Image (cartoon, helix red, strand yellow):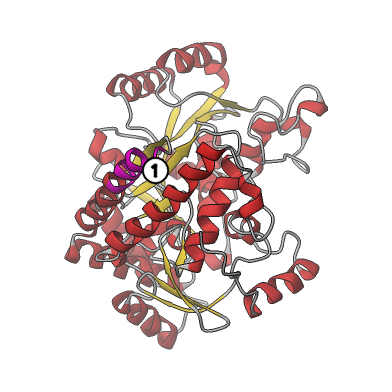
Amino acid sequence: MNKTPIEVGNSQALYQRAKQLIPGGTQLLSKRPEMFLPDLWPAYYSEAKGCKVTDLDGKEYIDVGLMGVGTNLLGFCDEDVDNAVIKAVRQGTNTTLNSPEEVELAELMLDLHPWAEMVRYTRTGGEAMAVAVRIARASTGKDKVMFCGYHGWHDWYISSNLADDKLGDGHLIPGLEPNGVPRALLNSSIPFTYNDVQDFADKIEKHGKDMAAVVMESVRNFEPNADFFAAVRAETTKRGIILIVDEITAGFRMNIGGAHLRYNLEPDIAVFGKAFSNGYPMAAIIGKKQFMEAAQTSFISSLFWTERIGLAATLATIKKMQKVDSPARVIAVGEEVQAGWKKISASTGVDFKVLGFPAISAMGISHPKVLAYKTYYIQEMLKRGYLATIAFYASCAHEGYVPDYLRHTEEIFGEIGELMKSDADPASFLQGPQCHAGFARLT
């Protein structure tokens, strides 16, 4: 085992300062260093290109983890996308008039999704989901929402974590605290389980008459059962409930457009973000005209939804994806990783499940000391020059890097296997505290 200590540099020092100035240290839970390697993770970057990231001390790492939390399918700093953005900046990003790219992107999104007829834009996924739910409520005149999956931080979603007894708040989805969410929203959002037709049927029967929308991710950790999508679509259509598909994570990874197209699911509204703009702030809500026009009956408006950069980046990204067939390339990288993980589990004796579809994979490790072992893996990969975790967001930029990544991963999991056999305390092999647990996904 490599006992070489990890040097604490300028990046971690700056993070210690940030925690005094910024609540939580960062703006995104998924980027907090405590989620990876507390006190040692290189919290800040100076530049990035492809799948390589350089920290504030000039150390270069290969990102084989989150790749900008799923935003960079083409790789960091893609030249074609960046050139489109630079052109937009030089032409002016925000004026009294509107950007014509709004119309061009709308036409492109609707060409990719023939079932849809109208488009609205925001700049983040969470607010796009809030807009979609607002439109559904405005269109139906009803308040309640049923959902499965993760859909952001806004009140409509986090209200599901309110309990009848305040002591129970936050227990439904551990890690997503509903403090500050009005208790008047209690029971306005009802969770159900992905792929569980009976659970869906029971809850739609109980709450259907008050239901504005059913919200779900198209796919995440498991492939959808055909009967599940069929049941959801049939019931929502019969009851006049709007079906909203959240494509923020899955969209544009397995195909150009929403993953729902692969499963022959026709929603009423679909929401996009993350990968379709390759790292630039952008999100879109597309849908059928009869529902989308309800946006005009509610006040849904924001200045920076009109800026030009996100529009230009998204147009360039989608066109580049089409040109290079990014879905096929990303899937091939992900399949290589998943196959390697399965071999590593078998060869090292560390039992874990390979979760997710190839474009986004995760190791499902069931062990009482999973956080300590996860931290050890991240620690040892960092020493080898990798930003790694037990998830892998595949990108075109990873092509050619997978064999070495898997070789190092196998070495470290071999060490973890020996630790498990010896019953040694894995925390004693850590150079700092163990990583924090993230929020639990409610699927």
Is 348 in the magenta? yes
Magenta: main secondary structure equals helix
Farthest residue to the front: give it.
Answer: 422
Is 266 in the magenta? no
Say above or below: 105 vs 332: below
Determine whether, in the image, residue 194 is placed left or right of residue 21: left
Residue 53 lies, in percent from the top left, at 45, 74
Q: Secondary structure at mark 1?
A: strand
Residue name at image x 28 percent, y 58 percent: 107
Q: Is residue 116 something that shows in the picture?
A: no
Residue tagged by mark 1? 270
Nearest to the observer: residue 317 or residue 366 = 366
Residue 156 lies, in percent from the top left, at 63, 38
Farthest residue to the bottom: give it.
Answer: 90
Determine whether, in the image, residue 57 is placed left or right of residue 316: right
Residue 394 image-quadrant placement = bottom left
Q: Which residues are magenta?
A: 340-349
Residue 380 lies, in percent from the top left, at 51, 60
Nearest to the observer: residue 15 or residue 168 = 15
Residue 63 lies, in percent from the top left, at 42, 65
Residue name at image x 63 percent, y 61 percent: 33
